[in-house]
Amino acid sequence: MSDNRESLKLRKIRFVYKGAEQEGTLIHENSGLLTIKLKSGYNIVAEKGAVEIKEESLEEAPQARSSKDTFIGSGPGKVTIVATGGTISSRVDYSTGAVTPSNDISFLKSTVTDLERRFTVELESRDNILSENMTPEKWVNIVRWVKEGLKKSHGVIVSHGTDTMSYTASAVSFMLEKQSGPVIFVGSQRSPDRPSSDAFTNIEAAIHFASAEIGDVGISMHSGNSDNKISLLRATRSRKMHSSRRDAFHSIGEEPMAFYSDGSVVINRLSKRPDDETVINDRLDSSVGLMYFHPSLSPEDLMNYSENKKAVILMGTGLGHAADRLIGPIREMTREGKQIVMTTQCISGTTNLNVYSTGRKLLDAGVLEMGNVVPEIAYVKAMYVLANYDFNDFGKIMKTNLRGELLTREEL
Amino acid sequence: MASGEKGKAPKESKVMIGLEIHFQLKGKKLFCDCSTESYGVQKTSFERILSPTASEMGFYDPAAEYEKTRDRKFRYVSTDNSCLVEADEEPPHSPNEDAIATGMMVAGSLNCRPLDSVMFMRKVVVDGSNTSGFQRTAVVGFDGKMETSRGPVRISSVCVEEDSARKIEQDRKVEEDVLYSLDRLGIPLLEIVTEPDILDAEHAVEVAKSIGFIVASTGRSRRQVDSIRQDVNISLGFGRVEIKGIQKLSLIGKSISHEIERQRNMRDAMEILKKRGGMKRPIMFSEAGKYFEKTESKMLKNAFRNRLSIYASVGSNLDGLLKNDQFRVGKDLSDIAKAFGLGGILHTDELPAFGITGKEVEMAREELSPGDEDAIIFVIADKSKAGKLSDAFTSRIKKLSSLDFSETRGPLEDGSTKFLRPLPGKDRMYPETDVPIVQIGSDARQRISEFVPRSEEEIAKDLSEEFSISLQDARTIASNFLLDDFRDLTETTKDGKLSARIMLQTIPEMEKKHKASFETGELNRLLKISTEMGWSRNTLENAMEVMLTRKLDAKQSAKEVQEASLSEGDLMVLVKEIADASGKEIKPGTLIAMLKQKTKKSFDPKEAIEILEKLK
């Protein structure tokens, strides 16, 4: 939208519809339907054949407020925003009537309190894709942009669609061997074209988090339904737990790392200090699968799904179980050298394959149990481990806590 | 806009009046599965910030921008009849097709041209009354016309929209701190807009009533305290003024005449200002606290304690215009200050007063070296608000002196109005992309075309026959649009006469007497209990009074009344005792008086007299 604003022409028409002659602006024409903006501001939709256009003229649209600035502010806190798309940088597309990604985040200027005085924010529009279209190849690009950002700024913010934000953020976390400052992922559940968008406060908080002494990758999203408190969640424990609420993101099994409210950051639990430099291992092996065990899952389905994969993360029931009928095929696969990794579809809590006989049989069949690592994070971690470690060490590294993804104790 | 853009001063023209009338519809909300009715249960609360956004054309709405300058936060409380949709935590569901059909019936009856597809728009409203920051609204018909006793009135449009959240609490001192309930948010609302063809207040009431009967005939309208709201648009040639949210038809007339007088006085004041040479210096508030250090004014002492100060500015050429017998420019500025969360303004047309001495005012005045016809305006504020107010007052006086009075105003009880915000423009509209376009199918079209509205008298007659109530009562119910509520009530009481009495007498009288209002859900439950228990009207009315005065729920009220009233057996024993002692020919009045001496518990006098009759 913002790119063609300057040359935007309005199609002013005088037309007759249902016997009444009126003036309006022709917004668009789509599969035989005309959308016309009336003088009152309302749009009407009418079949093309039912509208008689009497006069049409092109009128220069007055200059809309749109900015192409890539720098905002002149304060001491240097932050780079890597924009990748998603709801947070979505706009209404008036040609299709749907919400689509855009790169204009000039709204920050008017919405972030004290931004100009306290921070220097640089915007880098790197990509423009919806969350569901993210891939491991794109995660690798993002970690490279993050590294560049950390060279010139204290912290980096990655704006991202929320649906797969936990996957991307934890992939970036694993690929960052060392990080010189905070890397903060931020998204929104309501697009910024709505006055009630959560984007404004989530980004405001992200800018503050990105200026703190934190050497971790986190996610900056609403703590609750209110706009007055934002949580910073550890990427490798985070999960989107609601399809639409502002407080969709939860930290599984641990409290948020920090909170932002009333203009300041409060550290809630100790996180890693920033390193002296930034080092990345930007390799991922995407031959990893993630499968949800369900009561009718057949050995054939499991075998077919696992065919070209080096590792399969199973989301087992309860403490990490799968049906007896699958134990044979699993044993066969592990003997062939596949890694079968067990997590729990309960999401919260740990696996424990010693409690029931099924669990012990699974262990005997060569299953690797992941404890309380969140299934999606185990899936991302497996890609990282396969690409960067000796295959023989897979089990050992998967069970080692690398980035806070594995909790050795969970508090009541 | 005032017509004075091309250098010509606008002149007073014929008064033009248009109406925007809103009716709530009952059933389900417009975009979710919640009921339009609440039991009054409040659940959790949350806080939000709203930021104006550009319309699809890329412009910002002036009303929205104005609200933004006020740094407001809003609090909301969810209710039993609200869900994630009202909390703006879930996208809207498909629109309520019943509400759209009702809108189309009304549009058809007003001879509007019906649309084949309905497209919802977002109308930006950032005063907090919508959690989303916009109101969803769609035109269902346009370009209609209705006949009235004084000629045709054109109908611009009929819209189906969602109602806003209900303001339940506002800190008087901090106007920006508002608490809204979500019970009303999302209730389907029909908006009927007329062209400015209305001749005067009386005509406006006629138009409003006629439209009301059409809506009532659909059987879908909801009648609660604020279920019908009128906005009045008035133009005298100085721009359109919208008076928003007049609840009583009787206030329309007063509001119109007050507004005409206010605009005429404002024009006269502005003409004097112009003769004096206009506003020569902008409003520029500077700190004046040092002249009031030893003040005896309680108001100022209080302000200083709260870390506020007093700021002063020259009001260029405004002396005598801020407040005298005719002019009230001061009140106009005061309304603006209040909108910024301040208490108002003080000025030299009314000072010394409020404990502020002439000497203090003089000292502050000298510092500003004003001219002979200048006034001094004071505000109690902090530095940042005083700064914002300098700009706001300067542009306000500029706008008024160009004789552009267009704005949105709110009605007050006495018929006068106060400034609310600039008039919203068309830039506040953009498409609601979460809701697909609704095609009106042939079934719905059929239903819509079969609808025939009824006249007031027809409705009253039917009602009187159906429920065997007096034609008088039926007329009152019809003319006050109480039809649907009467039906609902009778569904509960199983007794039309009782319903008519409760609705037309008991409720209004009790509410007036105790200056409180019934909570619909609880009252309904009480009526259900009464029907089930076979209470007399007397017992029911006692229970209602207990409910209203002691704020009890239905169960508690019923329990109280049952404990406090005589059982039929006990009443019989007492009546017998009296009859034995005083004879069976005792007069009913005496019987009641004697019974009241004998017991503190309540009883139904009619029942007592019947017992006495039986004894004879």
Image (cartoon, coloured by chain):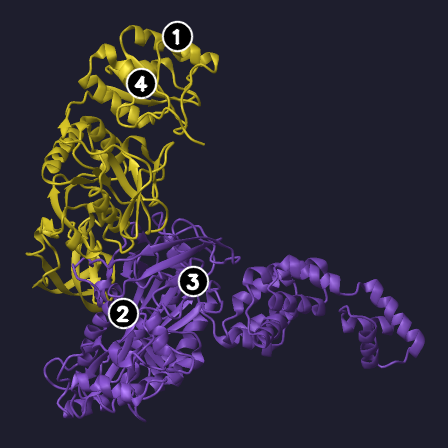
Chain B shade in the render:
purple
Q: Which mark is residue B415?
A: none
Q: Which residue is mark 3?
A: B450
**Residue A233 located left or right of residue A287:** right
Front residue of B100 and B8:
B8
Q: CA distance from mark 2 to mark 1?
A: 73 Å
Q: Are marks 2 and 1 in contact (CB under 8 Å)?
A: no
For the residues tagged 2 and 3, is the chain the same? yes
Q: Which mark is residue A364?
A: 1
> In x, y percent, where is residue A112?
21, 53
> In x, y percent, where is residue B162?
37, 60
Three-letter residue code for mark 4 = Lys
Protein chain holding label 3: B
Residue depth check, mark 1 versus mark 3: number of the one nearer the observer: 1
Q: Are marks 4 and 3 in contact (CB under 8 Å)?
A: no
Q: CA distance from mark 1 to mark 3?
A: 74 Å
Chain A shade in the render:
yellow
Q: Which residue is mark 2?
A: B382
Q: CA distance from mark 4 to mark 3?
A: 72 Å
Q: CA distance from mark 4 to mark 2?
A: 59 Å
Q: Which residue is mark 4?
A: A399
Residue depth check, mark 4 versus mark 3: number of the one nearer the observer: 4
For the residues tagged 4 and 1, is the chain the same? yes
